[in-house]
Each structure stands twice: as C-alpha cells, then as structure tokens.
Amino acid sequence: MVDHLMPLLAPFKALVLRIGWDSASVAKRINTPVLYLAGDADTLVPHFHMKDLYKISMKTSLCARIHIVKGGTHNETWHQGGEKYYQAIKHFISEAFSMERSNSFMTADSECEDDWVNKGASKVPPLDVGMGVEKDGPGVQNVIPTMPGNLMGMAKAAGAGDAPKKAGKKD
C-alpha cells in the first residue's frame, strides 16, 4: 500500500516498515468463510487491494464473498453503506451457517462483487439470522450479542446516585 499511497517513498519502505503485513500470504491460508467489506473511496486501504485478496480467497476459502460500498471511505463505510451494508453481513452469516449445517460449502461462481447478495451463491436454503435488534422468534437466531434493553436507564440511575447500595455498607 505504501507503493500506492506514497510512491516516492516506495524505494525506502523496507527501512521504516516493521509490521511485515503480507495479507496475500495470509489470504492463501484462509479456508474458512470470509467476507471482505470495502469502500471504493477508501484512501487508506484501496479497494483494489480488497479485490485482490478476494480473488485469492476464492481459490482457497470455503465461502469467499466481497461487498464494496460505493463512495465508502475507510472509517465510514459502515455508515455510508446503509442498510445494504448490514444486509450483506446478515446474508453472509446466514449463508455460511446454512452451508455448514448442510456441509455444502462452495465458492462463488461470479467475480462480480455483491452478485451473491442479489442472487445467492449457494443452493442451500438460508438460515434466518438476526443482527441483534430483532426479537428472538421461531427460526431467528441472533448472531450478534446485544446489550440489555434497559442499559441507558441503568446508566442514568447509577449516575444520579440511585444505584442500589450494597447491604451492610455504611455511608
């Protein structure tokens, strides 16, 4: 990425870079389901880098997917992507769980990003998963942990001095 972001410094990157982050070699070893989320306006990690990792993962992962947010930047992609961003995550989790249950993992048959969200890449019926905001009901499995519903009320009460006092403790 230094080559892309600071081309004049590229010849000297070995002198200053200590992390040794080689994402491509890591992607080659990932065989579990993987979802790449990227913004096409990301100036820190260019989305072509994510596309390259996705192409590598398509060869090795049981279920490789990518979702690119149009106009998405590095830190705000989650917000800029809106409902489609969360639907992509939900669809990926649902697909991965369904494939695991039926032992039918398969690679995407298209290099077109988000094609799998629209058409579905597997032949397995989806498992209905929640994103932590739905009420648990028949057939819905929340996969993202949620906070207690009254967390704000509990915090306000604690801040106002209304928190319950421990028994046996004198003021």
Image (tube, rainbow, N blue to C red):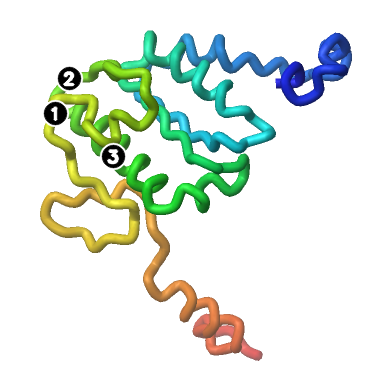
The answer for how far apart the CA atoms under marks 2 and 3 are is 16 Å
Would you say 135 lies left or right of 131 here? left
- Position of 145 relative to 28 (above/below): below
Tag 2 residue: 104
The quadrant in which residue 10 appears is: top right
Residue at x 51% of width, y 53% of height: 79
Tag 1 residue: 124
**Cβ–Cβ below 8 Å for labels 1 and 2?**
yes
Mark 3 closeness class: few <14, some 14–19, many ≥20 residues within 10 Å: some
Residue nearest the observer in this picture, 98 or 116: 116
Kind of residue indicated by mark 2: Ser
Residue at x 37% of width, y 71% of height: 149
- Position of 135 relative to 45 (above/below): below
Q: Earlier in the sequence, mark 2 or mark 3?
A: 3
Mark 2 closeness class: few <14, some 14–19, many ≥20 residues within 10 Å: some
SS for tag 2?
Answer: loop
The answer for how far apart the CA atoms under marks 1 and 3 are is 12 Å
Provide residue 74's location: percent of width, then percent of height. Answer: 62, 40
The answer for how far apart the CA atoms under marks 1 and 2 are is 8 Å
Kind of residue indicated by mark 1: Val
Quadrant into which the C terminus falls: bottom right
Which mark lies nearer to you, 1 or 2?
Answer: 1
Tag 3 residue: 91
